Amino acid sequence: MHRTGSATSPLHGGHCPPWLFTKMKELGAAIVEAMIVEYGTLEVLQRFSDPVWFQAFGSTLGFDWHSSGLTTVVLGALKEGLAPKEHELGLYMAGGKGRTARKTPTEINDKGSRFALANTSTALIYASKMAAKVDSAAVQDGYQLYHHVMLFDAEGHWAVIQQGMHNTNHMARRYHWLDRIPDTFTRHPHQAVVGAMTAEVFDLTESANWPIQDASLELSQYPDQVLQQLRHIEEHPDGHRDLLLPRFHAIPSSRHIDTILRKVYEEANPKSFEDLLGLSGVGASTIRALSMVAEVIHGTHPTFHDPVRYSFAHGGKDGFPYPVNRHNYDTSIATLRQAIERARLQDHDKMQALKRLSSPNASALEQKPSPR
């Protein structure tokens, strides 16, 4: 499990010219198809869960490395490009930006029914829901999720890429998931979180904060005591200076939390923190309220470590380092298509030639960009 990161910048050219979007669809789909032919769908999912590979993939398709639009447009183009062949390739995509992200469960169900995907829909929908819940409620970093895409294969293996935008500085942050989660969705579940590192992120998935998960689950069974303590914190905030929650994590409204906690207690009876987090209505405010009360009652002080830790093949759509070269783009698409067709005919010479080009020992070939 690794957590890597690189700085992002404010939105920079999130829109894409129609001709370039069409080329992105063709080239992106051809690259993914070539990988499936050579390595299978599991390897493709693994690569999409790797933020460094994904960033390079987006740059190959013509996106600047620092553009938050890379995530939304590249995945949107790939989803459209793969759609005609998704069942043939055994790789499917659901979700997208804004309202489309909320349609992910419906799209998973539709594809499961249409393509008879071995009863994987329920588990995939749960994974999609929990990934979104974790990054909106259990990891409280000031970023509002607005993009969610799930890639999955016929056996039910999956990867999720979702992105959030900061409420004030409009920076983007991306969250990468893979289905090889070691324990639960709430304990070190990410493959990576990518963005500009900030101070005071309330991340309950970090191991140092697991005691708060346990205390929050226990306190959810005592709504009256929780609400009494929360009201005291609201009325006497200066009397709880030992609370370590950062100032930008506001004290939740006890009236709002009252409704949620009573629903949890009377109807749900969660058996784990994951169960609690997955309940409808339990969001960032509820988790924060339980954490505050747990800190006062049990002394479970939280930590606030940010989970973020740390090529242009065809040019960049914003003209940096040079404008996208249409001829080179078309040549790459044609070459990949020929390689795929030959590989399907058991003629791997073309694909092996492509592999040799990627070898560290291959001679560097540099070509000056020509005008579009």
Image: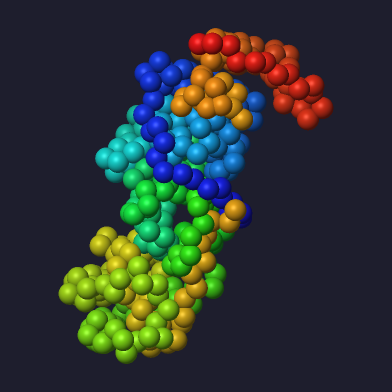
Name the residue located 72 percent from the left edge and 26 percent from the top edge. Answer: 358
In-front residue for pair 104/166: 166
Please determine whether, in this image, residue 212 is positioned above or below residue 132: below
Seen in the picture, residue 195 relative to 296 is either above or below; the reply is above
Q: Position of residue 9 (x, y in %)?
A: 46, 44
Considering the image in quadrants, where does the N terminus appear? bottom right
Q: Is residue 293 above or below residue 13?
A: below
Q: Residue at x 41, y 21 (%)?
A: 21
Q: Quadrant of residue 92?
A: top left
Q: Is residue 144 visible?
A: yes
Residue 150 shows up from this direction: no
Q: Residue 12 appears at what percent x and percent y?
A: 41, 36
Pinpoint residue 314: horizontal percent, then vertical percent: 56, 21
Choose between 88 and 22: the one closer to the eye: 22
* The image quarter in which residue 369 lies: top right
Which residue is painted at 43% across and 19% down in the image? 20
